[in-house]
Image: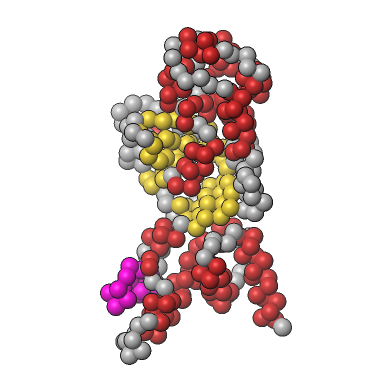
Amino acid sequence: MTESINFDNVINEYEKLVNLKNIDLTLDNGDKVSFHFKMSQLPHLLGLQHIKDIPLFFKYSEKHICASDLLKELKKGTLSQMELDQSDHFKDIYGTRIQYFNSKHIMNLLLNGIVIAFNPSKIKCFETKLDKIDYMIWERLEDGYSHLGLGFSVEDNIGHPNTFFYRTNRDYIEEQTICNKITLKIKNPECNEREFFKIYWENICDSLADNTHYKKLNKHTDLLGCDIKDITEEKIHNLDPNTPDKEFIRKEFNLFQMDKIKHVYEPYFSANFRWNNKEKLFIMNKIVEKGEDFPPSAVSVLLNDFRQKESN
């Protein structure tokens, strides 16, 4: 017997994700992945198409009813717990999908999960049907791993999460290429009118390891007594005035800061957008001063104000 389930609550939880509107991930391979949750995807994400010994789910799996009709029936409480418990398949689907599928866990997966460019041919121990997945986001959960698969839709030119599951092994993770997150932007997150925006600063440094200014700064980390990721203006300022190359270090640090800002924000701006080094450094200094990651919309406002002051 599985834990009692209320599908109305499951659907209400999923609506929180649908209300997030657009979600953008920028990755260190240069890709910008845009996607959103669709209500019509919920039955598939829950794996209900696999529970064919329950007539309502069998109709859905055979496309005799659409996702919206299935969800209406579930909200009405058409299925009893006894029917679910008598199914030979429900316990497995509940244990590997339904029990872990809630807005809190999915949000944590988006924030902290590891992104891989999914290639089904790299799975050698079995043949997978997940050939329409472009990216997979996974994280450690209890004694296993949760996975959220993203596929690209030609129909509306945006990605959609189209599979979710929990496994106790790493079959879908091993040998896959990790794509480190650079930024995560979520439009209209729950209980917040502003955009949510997170910058993964540590990943940015790693992704710019071939950058000229990174290489020059990295040669002076012993002098600064810290890793390149931990260099700050204050640490440079505190160097002895007679330290060789102090001004050189400051110059390279500022140039590297500008390149990091460019790496973060330019994927969100139009192709003809242009800004100078003074403007980039202004934005970076504002971020450091406020101690928060400004979303692209806020950066646009700051830049406009800065340009107006500079022109006066």
Asked if 57 appears above or below 257 in the picture, the reply is above
Q: Can you say which quadrant of the picture contains the C terminus?
A: bottom right
Residue numbers of the magenta segment: 213-228
Give above or below for 177 relative to 6: below
x, y (%) of residue 133? 48, 36
Whether residue 187 is visible: yes
Q: Decide which of 277, 92 is in the foreground and name it.
A: 92
**Quadrant of the image for the N terminus?**
top left
Going 42% across and 35% down the picture, which residue do you hit? 146
State left or right for residue 301 relative to residue 45: right
Residue at the image position 38 percent from the left and 68 percent from the top? 230
Q: Residue 48, percent across and down?
A: 53, 21
The answer to which quarter of the image holds residue 18 is top right
* Residue 215 highlighted magenta (yes or no): yes
**Point 27% across, 74% down: residue:** 222
Q: Verify whether residue 195 appears in magenta.
A: no
Query: Where does residue 245 sit, x and y in percent of width and height?
Result: 34, 85
Name the one closer to the observer, 195 or 104: 104
**What residue is rendered at 30% in x and 28% in y?**
125
Residue at the far left: name it. Answer: 222
Position of residue 251 in the picture relative to residue 279 (left or right): left
